[in-house]
Amino acid sequence: MENITPVSKSGQSHRLSELRLVLIGGRELKGSKSSTGNFILGQNVFDTSKRTAQSVAMQGEVHGRKVTVIDTPGWWWYFTREDTPKLDQIEIQNSVYLCPPGPHAFLLVIPVDTHLSQISQASLKEHLELFKADVFSHTIVLLSSLGPFSGENVKSKIKRSPTLQWILQQCGNRIHVLDIINMQDSSQVQQLFVKIDAMVANNGGNHYSIDTADGNALRAEMKVLAKRATKRFDKVQKQRKELKALIEDGKVPPQHLKLVILGAQWAAKSSAGNTILGKDAFDVNNHNKRTMHCEIGHGMVAERQLTVVDSPGWFYINTLQDTNEMDKLEIQNSMHLCHPGPHAVLLVIVLATAINASYQRTVQEHMSLFTDDVWKHTLLLFTRGDWLGEKTVEERIESEEGLQWLVNKCGNRYHVLNNIDRSNREQVKELLEKIEEMWAANEAPYYEVDPDRAQQIEDEIETGRKKAKKMRKITERQSRILKALFLEEMEITDIRVILVGRKGSGKSVAGNLILFDELFKEDFPTAWLKKDLQDQNRARKSVKRQGNFDGVKVTVIETPGWYIDTSVPEWLRGEVLRSVSMCAPGPHVFLLVVPISRVFTEKDQKALVELLMPFTERVWRHCMVLFTWGEWLNEVPIEEHITREGKILQDLVEKCGNRYHVFNQTDFGKPAPVKGLLQKIINVVTQNKGCFSTEGKQRKFPAFLWPTKQPLLTEEAWNRREQTLIDRMLKAIANEPDVSPVPAETMAHSIDDFYIPSMSGDLTSEYGSMSQFRKDKAHDIVAQWLKRTVRKSHTTSGIGSSICSSDNYVEQLDESPLLQ
């Protein structure tokens, strides 16, 4: 295996007779830390069939040395440390105390095909802060490969990844590559040991030192958790015994059990429904789709007739106020699909992430969609049971206050489900027994719903579909009219775009999608939750990035975002003004970025209006709404989201001339969505006869281009008359009636619980991991299309038609008459 980055030779290395190594890194399914540990030791001592839930130390003699390797739990590369379960954090900390007096090296294991976004950098830094001392100076980056990986490939990977470059810089450019499939090649491990020897020598011959007192305190904390867990377990068993006695004494449970599944998105609700029913009642095969509408599944399980209702999940950090109206309505509707009400509500909590304060709050608020009696009929259903490893669910509960609150709120009713092992029907049988015990304890046999509310929900859903259908028709008509009005050829040499939106809206990912590169820095998904006013008032700068599409230069400027619960700071108004001067003579379009996964509020609308107010009302002719998180909708048309969200969002879209576009986070590297957006931008440029500018010209034209005594009009007034005429025509078209129904969705979609995705509004998710070849190919496709489009386009104005150049505000108007 070729070495591409040598270890520093500033210190004289010597061969250590004993090596103590700690494997650290993110959670991976291939090329994992466990597989790497087995390769180093030359034997399969770490279990690769399941997740490493506890730090484990294994020893062996390798090349004449006594080698100790500690495998640790991995974290999700796209999560903050706050999102990592407390038990995992404790186990990561404990790893260094399993090899006293301390490890010689930390091996940061990164599979070569892992996509490291900018957010991974912050995640790594936060997780390494679990250790008391500097870890980077004792760390070697270990790229694990499932096949030959040349030095040139490594160089290419480093060149393409700014995050990997940063990691290497922190680690003193120490890197090694292991082809862990080729276990016969012992020279790979020998070369690794040589680099470890050199690193230790550079550190003055010292290993990473540990504090015995800290280790004792950590073990004491673990014992306290175990003791509390045992106490909770005993209490639950006593409670269950009492309820079983009620059933044995003659309180016969219903033979037909009706269950409703609720929970956050990515909690594996649909998978849980399939595990319970023992069949594929709900679609979980497509990672790009989620449950959009409530769905019903039926089956006979353990001699019981079951009806299971799957519901849409809310975004895991969204408050109830943040959740869009469509999702809230569907969640409420779930209770009405099993009349007269469900016997049990299964509140799904995934064990793969921490239940911190924000997670607890969002669960509590979404449960408030129902009356407080719902808690009497609610049982916590933990998914990803494999995440526990050797730990008990009670230990996990006692490690997090948010979980303790939820469990206590549900009267100590909970169950662990492993959806990976669907053949284990005993776990389902036990769940049904717990549901029957809960039923026996309640005075009311089921959670009672309001029948009148069911009809109201059905009417609201149908009304939303009809409005969406009408909106689509209007938009299509207006598009056809505008296309007919703007027919002549044009040429554009560059396109300039300004992104405006709150924090977490998806501006950064939108910019990266447009330019086919990770050029804009991304934030953690919880960034918009911060309430640090000092941070809010700290001025930030707009960021300008450019791409070249075969001679057509595309400039994207991302303006800073603002926190949703605070007013727009004064410095941000100035920064949006400055962004216009950053792309002189002015932008072709302002993209107002709105995430579909969260509600668009009156505060959001007010903030956008305030930021654009200095540009006067004419700026709205150059605005377009860019919806992000389009995958949140599945096949549901964006118009249905717009109409269901209410008047505030509809007003924004109308203010932008009914111009809007949708981006999925899964679109990274796909040419079609970018082509669609650029075509709409070209249409905006054509309709406006150029870009937006704060400087107008006062050339004069006659009101009509035939002999007349009418006073001369300025070019601005001329264009205003033309725009007014177009606006009136489009409004007239919009008033035409259309009541055609929209077909309803018939199948729920979700992801399975093998996948924990990016949960950020401002990041490229794991879907974004792709080869340089694919990215370059997509870029070239758009470049070829764009070159053809802007050099031979049929979208220039036919009313006072012009040849439009993006380098000029207004070009010479055609002298032909307005009316023929």
Image (tube, rainbow, N blue to C red):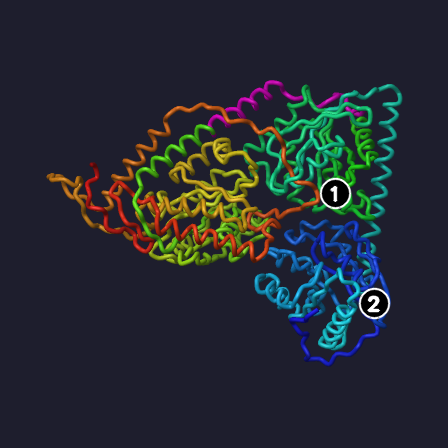
Q: Is residue 487 left or right of residue 226?
A: left
Q: Residue 499 colored magenta? A: no
Q: Nearer the viewer, residue 594 or 708?
A: 708
Where residue 58 appears, as percent x and y from the top left, is 84, 61
Q: The residue tagged with tag 2: helix, strand or loop?
A: strand
Q: Quadrant of residue 43?
A: bottom right
Which residue does the numbered mark 1 point to in the structure image?
384
Q: Is residue 276 above or below residue 541?
A: above
Q: Nearer the viewer, residue 135 or 688?
A: 688
For image coordinates 54% across by 22% down, the residue present is 459
Task: Please give the range of residues in magenta.
Answer: 439-468
Q: Give x and y (percent) for residue 1.
A: 70, 69
- Residue beneath disc 2: 67
Task: Label 1, secondary structure: give it.
Answer: loop
The three-letter code of the residue at mark 1 reads Arg
Image quarter where the C terminus lies is top left
What residue is rendered at 65% in x and 52% in y? Answer: 80
User: Is any part of residue 451 visible from this angle?
Assistant: yes
